[in-house]
Image (cartoon, helix red, strand yellow):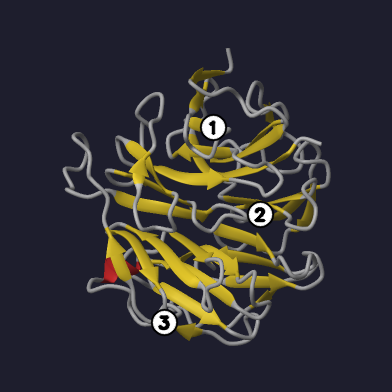
Amino acid sequence: MAATGTATALDGATIGIGTVGAGAWFSFDGGDRFRHVYRHLEPEGNVRAMTVSPHDPATVYAVCDRVGLFVSRDRGYLWEPVNKDVCTEDLWSLTVDPHDADTIYVGGRPTLYRSVDGGATFDALPTGLGPNCPIGAPRITNVVVDPADRDGLWLGVEVDGIYHSSDRGATFTHLPDPGETPFHGDIHGLALRRATGAERTQVLIGTPFGLGTSDDGGQSFAWRSFEGFPIGSGNPYAYCRGVFVWPNDPDTILVGCGDYIPGRIGAIEISRDGGASFERAALPVPPNSTVYWMATHPDLPGMIAAASVFGQVFVSADTGRSWAKLDREFGEIRSVTLAPSA
């Protein structure tokens, strides 16, 4: 049996899992079986970020700490190195520009790299990030290209708030502190949301204090906290991590959370009304740690793959109304991808 719960494995989907210390794993049958990537993409490396190209669902990119950028052209089966020069630091985030398949951004600790030739060469961009923050060197945990503005680029930084560029990364502005403490700027998740008919893009961030929402381009934030947990850190509110807006449906928002990081218990909060209200997903078992990473794909309506920090994978085929936990578990998960199997 591949999954437990009221849902089944994701028929027709390829699920990718990036780990700390065990490289990457891919399932080509929706989670029934996983294959360890053992050639080229470091089998014992730290794969903190992977992404499916928005231009081709068969193309998957991954970065490995202090090694570089890799690509698969067959949905995650065979891999080859693209660039091993981006390897002087830990690599925390990765995105392909939805407006230009040859433009790739890699967020490190603390450098932002950009390639405009498909990854063959990279330049370090002048973000203005300093070398230190309350946890040491800041980490670029999120790089988001605005789908409605090809020049708009957003960075979420742990622990240094939000940076924005209006010229594709040539220059950056460090936006005002999103909250009253430095750790309101401990950005774990960042997503952009353009409601139907809205004139401006809404900015969503996940932090230890909850979900922050900005309707003025990140100049100010309203805050929503989620209920805490009976076990774990004892915080009265949930510690939020990744934030995700459903492809083609801006009213559906997913937030991963837990009691702390890595935590002893986790949860997924779901809104179906654009963030006006949220409900906690009815997962088949309590996650063994904070839920951080989730993945959807515009060609897989209703499907979600979500992971706890300590290796559990949960899937849904009905936009989070019912869930299954895959039998296969991993060590420490750092990234998740989802794409059609063919």
Q: Amino acid at mark 2?
A: Val
Query: Which residue appears at 38% of the width and 67% of the height?
Result: 213
Numbered marks: total:
3
What whole-number distance in Å separates the C-alpha atoms at marks 3 and 2? 31 Å
Q: Amino acid at mark 1?
A: Val
Label 3: which secondary element: loop
Q: Is residue 119 left or right of residue 204?
A: right
Query: Which residue appears at 71% of the width and 43% of the height?
Result: 41
* Between marks 3 and 1 in the image, the one whose residue lies nearer the viewer: 1
* Between marks 3 and 2 in the image, the one whose residue lies nearer the viewer: 3
In the rendered image, the residue lying farthest to the top is 1
* Between marks 1 and 2 in the image, the one whose residue lies nearer the viewer: 1
Which residue is the site of mark 2?
A: 67
Q: Amino acid at mark 3?
A: Leu
What whole-number distance in Å separates the C-alpha atoms at marks 1 and 2? 30 Å
Q: Is residue 196 left or right of residue 258?
A: right
- Let me know if residue 290 appears in the view: no
* Mark seen at residue 315: 1
Q: Is the residue 28 above or below the residue 234 in the image? A: above
Quadrant placement of the N terminus: top right
* Mark seen at residue 175: 3
Q: Is the residue 51 above or below the residue 122 in the image? A: above
